[in-house]
Image (cartoon, rainbow, N blue to C red):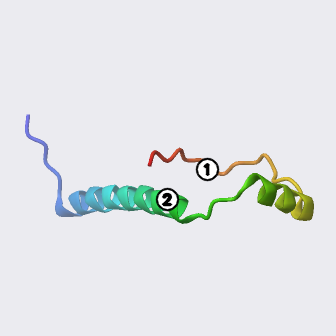
Amino acid sequence: MALKLDDRKIKLLVKEGVKEAMDSQFMKLSALLLPHVSPKEQKEIVRLYGRPSRRVAKSYIIKA
């Protein structure tokens, strides 16, 4: 069975696929560029600014 797609649908599918791939790569890159925070620094941050809320919009697990 042959599948017929017009040019607009193909372009949209490719565009969405590339966007998803770029988003995931940028998330990995931004996670790798975050500076390391020592436990002592983290305690100081919590003391100054309080604990972060438990609300999570998105979470990613990055395998380096």
Q: Please tell me which residue is depicted at 24% across the width and 63% down the height of the picture.
A: 11
44 lies left or right of 63: right
* Residue nearest the observer in this picture, 60 or 16: 60
Q: Say which residue appears at 41% left-offset and 59% top-offset.
A: 25
Residue at the spot 38% in from the left edge and 62% down from the top edge:
22
Q: Is mark 2 on a helix, strand or loop?
A: helix
Question: Looking at the image, is mark 2 or mark 1 nearer the viewer?
Answer: 2
Q: Where is residue 59 in the image (x, y as percent from the top left)?
A: 60, 47
- Splitting the image into 4 quarters, where does residue 6 fall? bottom left
Rendered image: mark on residue 27: 2
Q: Which amino acid does label 1 sit on?
A: Lys
Q: Around disc 1, counting alpha carbons within 10 Å, would you say few (fewer than 14), some (14 to 19), or many (20 or more)?
A: few
Q: Which of 17 and 33 is in front in this view?
A: 33
Q: Residue at x 46, y 45 (%)?
A: 63
Q: Which residue lies furthest to the top in this view?
A: 1
Residue nearer the viewer, 55 or 16: 55
What type is the residue that disc 2 sits on?
Answer: Met
Q: What element carries label 1?
A: loop
| Position above or below: 35 against 38 | below
Describe residue 27's horizontal placement relative to residue 58 as left or right.
left
Q: Find residue 38 and report its image quarter.
A: bottom right
Determine which residue is flagged by label 1. Answer: 58
Instruction: Count neighbours of disc 2 (C-alpha within 10 A) and say few if under 14, some if 14 to 19, many if 20 or more.
Output: some
Q: Residue 14: which quarter of the image? A: bottom left
Say which label, 2 or 1, has the lower sequence index. 2
C-alpha separation, residue under disc 2 versus residue under disc 1: 11 Å
Which percent across, then down, holds residue 40? 80, 56
> Where in the figure is residue 17, as x and y percent of width and height?
32, 55
**Quadrant in which the N terminus is drawn:** top left
Residue 35 shows which numbered tag? none
